[in-house]
Image (spheres, helix red, strand yellow):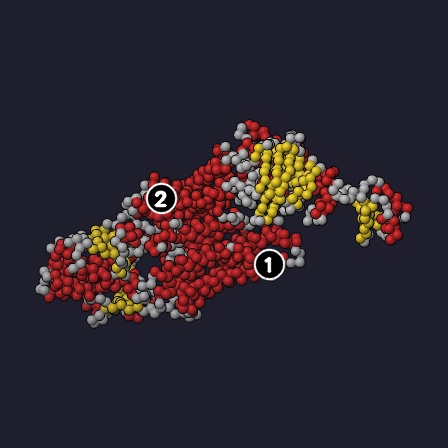
């Protein structure tokens, strides 16, 4: 597939502190690429470098096959960005805000009008056209922020944590919107520190930490990087030591832990584990309240790669 | 693209109440205060009737010349009336003086005349001068009598004495005008708040909206130019409203040629605009702090050019001229002052040139920051 | 302690603001204190004049100049048109006398020549005019009746020499007190601006933080929190007052260390407290910092102009002064003006001063009541 963006050896320093360390990756046409990492891992810095807002020490950035630079106006035309901070003008209504930013790209008034309507529809703000930003709730403001970034129908869209501090309803709306944009043919670079979002949304994920790429791939290939396959948690009233020892001898069990009345069992491989355990519990008359089975998450991957939680 | 930016900048500026307050409402409010406080100053400096008392004793009764003169000077029909005289005894006069109901009183002793007053003041001095003058006339009469000139002739000589003073003062001498000039200067510089606000919105390192405009496919300086033009126009509207208000409501008479006034106001606003740009680009603080800095600079500048005491401008001009040579508020104030008071345009031109230089300097200083497209950090 | 510390951390953040208004005060009073230094005796009200003599400085001309120098403050100003014009405009000089070429000759020829003058048309200019006119009158008379220049000069001087004795009953040193008065009058502007600005900013900052605080730190009672803020505000006001008193001490030296000076300071303290209550009231009106800085400028500058902080009260129009009664600054400045004129200081004499202070306190109470009403109403809405 065609590469829309190519980044080679991108290195950025803030006052002698390394922010991006020799980053190289590419974004393919029509995909949603997720940049996943904890706060301060370099996601926004990467985007700002790609947009030529930040100077960097070394590296090479090509967008649509051309060198990206501040004066590359033909490239800029094709790009839409939704920044992490809400970037709208308080003095303008919802409609005027979108019109203003869209107008920086689209000259024809009729076309612009149509685009604005479509953007309003996409983020579900049609009824709020005449509202001022301060009259909108946090979630609605975020949606407006998105509409301002994408109304001009760019081919490449950068979304920098667009769902931070957003209510579930707005969040779903935003995620649905992003999927729609991809369907319409846009290539999307999406940064987040919510692994669930990355899992649901992204075709490919790059995990960043301290300015370095830790891992890259689709969610399944990434999850293989976690050295567990399944984790089962059981709330039990009581369990004898001998029974615990027995569980440990199951073929695929990696580790058994008990903390008060929570029993956690991690498995190396992931087939029929739950069935086997239930059977065992029944046979030995061990009563239990709740049972959860979890597949490894990207957090487990991250944990395994860095020894710390993604959300720290 | 130019008109798109221009139109939206106008819209943004005209909807921001805080900006409008500083550029439109505040100057008008302050102008009203000035009008209230200063409308009386120059009038009240003219002479008022001075209240005095004279001890009506035997000695006084002998002093024909004094009696006549004081009767004349306190005559209500006299248009040059200076005094209102109470003839009384010493106790009452003392009491009146203590209660500050009179400026002073006169006691005629055998050889001497004593004036008793409470304090040093203008009225006291005038009283003394009059007494001295009568004394002097008495002496003249004595001298001329000694020269065998007839008393009646002496009287004629004294009364028909003509003093030819030719007043060549220029008409425009109302120094409270300085107050209104500083007010205009303040409005011009406060206008910088508009350009500051606009510049903040166009730079990626000062606002998130700035990031958004920076990634758009439009040349940054072109976009900035369109927006600054809009802010300049809003500024000019503010100044125009202030002028109309002072002329038609407060009845301030600028009495200078209008084209010169307009040129000065335009350049003054330009100085404000450039000041705003440079604060926006050069100072790395949040917007509130920047506003505070702009207001502080303006206030200090206006203070030095006489807003809170007109003599301040004169003292600075005279003793630390350099301070006011680089003070944009004073360039504007002084420009108006020289138009109003001077017959030649030299000083006005100097101020015009200073304002231009100031604006150019400010814009040059901020140019690097304005042109910058990539930042080390944002 | 944390609340207390945070409070003064915010104060520190706005130190630029405090500095600005303090500098304004120092400049204003500093310059006023240094310029009027020659006013120590009755010659205080000598008009400032400028003599531009194009004639030879001998005989009658010399005598005229000598007489003028004796009876006025003759200023030396660089003979540049611009400097002279400025000096007249700003009333540095009140009167300019141009003595023409051949003045002496014309006089002796009995021509009564014209003398060009420029005048500011105020009290002092009138005085100068009187002095000049008197001399010329005497001169005219003697020139008409005598021939010898020396005789004329002798007689002129003899006639003009006769002067009344003037006695000043007042014993107070008016100049020093006048300066103290200037300082404290202008201080009303600086004090009020510094107090309202900073306190409003701090209170609005705390209001925004409060919302978080109430949720996160439940261990701190809300009322206790407010009490600490009130105490910190009082402390801040007190510190500002001390600062201004010390500044006054530096500028005015021992004049301030008199009973009169102490009453001036007490008056300033009461006024500072009143400013605090205004600040509290304003901050209950709005939470917007930018709006606050607008309101503060209008309130402080407006009061300063209308109540006589910049312009002596006797120059203000009567109707403005009547209107000013509803402004706290008016009462503060009235007290200063009363104090300035006070001959002897005893309980009876300072009664009106105490009354003014009481009015300031009543104003403060009124502001607090208004503040409470507004806050109550706002809470209900929430």
- Do the numbered discs 2 and 1 sit on residues whose CB atoms are within 8 Å? no
Residue at the location (40% across, 58% down)? C27
Tell me the number on the disc at residue B353: 2
**Residue B164, how many percent across, how many down?**
18, 53
Drawn side of residue A309 relative to residue C141, left or right: right
Residue C67 in the image, given as x and y percentages of width and height: 21, 62
Q: Of residues A45 and C325, which is closer to you in this image?
A: A45
Q: Chain of mark 1?
A: C
- Distance from disc 2 to disc 1, alpha carbons, whole Å, reads 53 Å
**Are there few (<14), some (14-19), or many (20+) residues within 10 Å of tag 1?**
some
Q: Residue at x 55, y 50 (%)?
A: C287
For the N terminus of chain C, give its image quadrant. Answer: bottom right
- Look at the numbered disc 2 and give the secondary structure of its residue: helix
Q: Nearer the viewer, residue B45 or C325?
A: B45
Q: Residue at x 51, y 58 (%)?
A: C276
Q: In terms of secondary structure, where does tag 1 sit?
A: helix
Residue tagged by mark 1? C3
> Is residue C162 toward the left or the right of residue A160 in the image?
left
Count of numbered tags: 2
Which residue is more in the foreground, B5 or C134?
B5
In the image, B331 versus B88, the foreground residue is B331
Name the residue at 39% across, 48% down. B328
| Extreme-left residue of the structure | B148
Q: Is residue B309 visible?
A: yes
Q: Disc 2 is attached to a residue of which chain? A: B
Q: Is residue B28 above or below residue A116?
A: below
Disc 2 versus disc 1: nearer the observer: 2
Q: Which mark is residue A288?
A: none
In the rendered image of this protein, does residue A124 appear above or below residue C52? Answer: above
Q: Is residue B152 left or right of residue C363?
A: left
Q: Quadrant of residue A93?
A: top right
């Amino acid at each position: 597939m065609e590469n829309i963006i190519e980044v080679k050896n991108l290195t950025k320093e803030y006052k002698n502190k390394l922010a991006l360390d020799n980053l190289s990756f590419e974004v393919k046409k029509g995909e949603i690429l997720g940049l996943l990492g904890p706060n301060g891992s370099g996601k926004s810095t990467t985007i700002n470098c790609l947009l030529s807002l930040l100077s960097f020490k070394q590296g090479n950035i090509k967008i649509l096959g051309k060198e990206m630079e501040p004066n590359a106006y033909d490239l800029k035309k094709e790009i839409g960005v939704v920044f992490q901070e809400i970037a709208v003008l308080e003095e303008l209504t919802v409609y005027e805000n979108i019109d203003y930013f869209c107008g920086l790209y689209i000259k024809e008034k009729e076309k612009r009008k149509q685009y604005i309507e479509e953007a309003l529809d996409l983020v579900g703000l049609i009824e709020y056209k005449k509202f001022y930003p301060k009259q909108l709730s946090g979630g609605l403001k975020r949606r407006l922020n998105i509409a301002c970034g994408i109304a001009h129908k760019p081919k490449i869209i950068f979304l920098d944590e667009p769902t931070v501090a957003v209510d579930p309803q707005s969040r779903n709306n935003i995620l649905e919107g992003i999927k729609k944009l991809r369907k319409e043919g846009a290539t999307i670079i999406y940064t987040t520190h919510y692994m669930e979002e990355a899992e649901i949304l992204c075709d490919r994920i790059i995990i960043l930490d301290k300015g370095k790429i830790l891992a890259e791939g689709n969610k399944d290939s990434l999850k293989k990087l976690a050295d567990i396959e399944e984790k089962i948690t059981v709330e039990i009233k009581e369990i004898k030591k001998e029974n615990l020892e027995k569980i440990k001898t199951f073929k695929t069990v990696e580790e058994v832990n008990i903390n008060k009345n929570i029993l956690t069992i991690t498995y190396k491989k992931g087939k029929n584990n739950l069935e086997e355990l239930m059977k065992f519990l029944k046979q030995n008359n061990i009563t239990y309240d709740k049972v959860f089975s979890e597949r490894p998450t990207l957090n487990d991957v991250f944990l395994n790669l860095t020894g710390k939680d993604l959300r720290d | 693209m130019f008109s798109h930016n221009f139109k939206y900048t106008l819209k943004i500026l005209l909807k921001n109440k805080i900006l409008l307050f500083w550029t439109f409402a505040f100057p008008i409010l302050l102008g009203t205060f000035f009008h209230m406080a200063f409308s009386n100053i120059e009038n009240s400096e003219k002479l008022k009737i001075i209240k005095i008392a004279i001890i009506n004793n035997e000695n006084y009764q002998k002093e024909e010349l004094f009696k006549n003169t004081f009767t004349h000077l306190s005559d209500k029909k006299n248009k040059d009336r200076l005094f209102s005289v109470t003839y009384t005894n010493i106790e009452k006069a003392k009491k009146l003086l203590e209660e500050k109901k009179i400026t002073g009183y006169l006691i005629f002793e055998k050889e001497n005349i004593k004036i008793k007053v409470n304090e040093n003041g203008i009225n006291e001095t005038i009283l003394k001068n009059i007494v001295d003058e009568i004394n002097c006339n008495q002496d003249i009469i004595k001298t001329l009598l000694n020269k065998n000139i007839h008393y009646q002739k002496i009287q004629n000589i004294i009364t028909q004495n003509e003093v030819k003073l030719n007043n060549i003062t220029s008409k425009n001498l109302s120094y409270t005008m300085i107050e209104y000039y500083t007010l205009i200067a303040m409005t011009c510089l406060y206008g910088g708040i508009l350009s500051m606000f606009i510049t903040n919105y166009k730079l990626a390192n000062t606002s998130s909206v700035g990031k958004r405009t920076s990634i758009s496919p439009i040349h940054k300086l072109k976009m900035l130019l369109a927006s600054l033009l809009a802010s300049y126009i809003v500024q000019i509207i503010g100044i125009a409203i202030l002028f109309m208000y002072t002329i038609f409501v407060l009845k301030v008479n600028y009495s200078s040629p209008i084209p010169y006034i307009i040129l000065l106001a335009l350049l003054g606003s330009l100085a404000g605009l450039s000041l705003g740009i440079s604060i926006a680009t050069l100072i790395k603080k949040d917007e509130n702090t920047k506003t505070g800095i702009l207001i502080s600079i303006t206030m200090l500048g206006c203070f030095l050019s006489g807003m809170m005491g007109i003599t301040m401008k004169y003292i600075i001009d005279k003793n630390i001229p350099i301070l006011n040579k680089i003070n944009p508020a004073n360039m504007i104030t002084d420009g108006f002052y020289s138009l109003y008071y001077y017959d030649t345009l030299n000083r006005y031109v100097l101020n015009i040139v200073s304002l231009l230089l100031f604006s150019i300097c400010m814009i040059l200083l901020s140019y690097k920051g304005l042109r910058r497209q990539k930042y080390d950090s944002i | 302690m944390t609340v207390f510390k945070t409070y003064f951390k915010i104060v520190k953040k706005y130190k630029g603001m405090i500095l600005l208004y303090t500098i304004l005060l120092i400049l204003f009073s500093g310059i006023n204190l240094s310029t009027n230094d020659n006013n120590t005796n009755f010659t205080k009200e000598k008009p400032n004049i400028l003599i531009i003599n194009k004639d030879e400085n001998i005989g009658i001309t010399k005598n005229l100049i000598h007489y003028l120098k004796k009876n006025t403050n003759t200023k030396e100003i660089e003979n540049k048109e611009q400097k002279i014009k400025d000096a007249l405009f700003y009333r540095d000089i009140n009167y300019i006398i141009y003595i023409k070429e051949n003045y002496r000759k014309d006089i002796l020829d009995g021509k009564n020549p014209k003398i060009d003058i420029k005048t500011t048309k105020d009290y002092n200019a009138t005085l100068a005019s009187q002095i000049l006119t008197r001399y010329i009158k005497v001169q005219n008379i003697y020139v008409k009746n005598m021939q010898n220049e020396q005789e004329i000069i002798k007689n002129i001087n003899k006639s003009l020499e006769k002067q009344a004795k003037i006695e000043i009953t007042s014993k107070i040193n008016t100049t020093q007190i006048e300066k103290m008065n200037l300082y404290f009058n202008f201080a009303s502007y600086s004090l009020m601006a510094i107090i309202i600005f900073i306190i409003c900013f701090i209170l609005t900052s705390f209001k925004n933080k409060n919302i978080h605080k109430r949720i996160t730190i439940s261990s701190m009672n809300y009322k206790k929190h407010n009490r600490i803020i009130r105490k910190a505000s009082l402390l801040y006001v007190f510190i500002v007052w001390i600062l201004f008193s010390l500044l006054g001490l530096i500028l005015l030296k021992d004049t301030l260390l008199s009973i009169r000076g102490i009453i001036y300071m007490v008056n300033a303290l009461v006024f500072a407290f009143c400013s605090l209550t205004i600040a509290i009231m304003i901050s209950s009106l709005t939470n917007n910092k930018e709006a606050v800085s607008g309101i503060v400028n209008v309130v402080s500058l407006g009061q300063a102009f209308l109540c006589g902080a910049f312009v002596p009260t006797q120059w203000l129009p009567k109707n403005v002064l009547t209107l000013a009664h509803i402004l706290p600054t008016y009462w503060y400045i009235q007290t200063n003006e009363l104090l300035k004129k006070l001959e002897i200081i005893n309980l009876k004499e300072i009664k009106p001063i105490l009354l003014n202070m009481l009015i300031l306190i009543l104003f403060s109470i009124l502001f607090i009541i208004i503040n409470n009403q507004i806050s109550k109403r706002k809470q209900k809405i929430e």
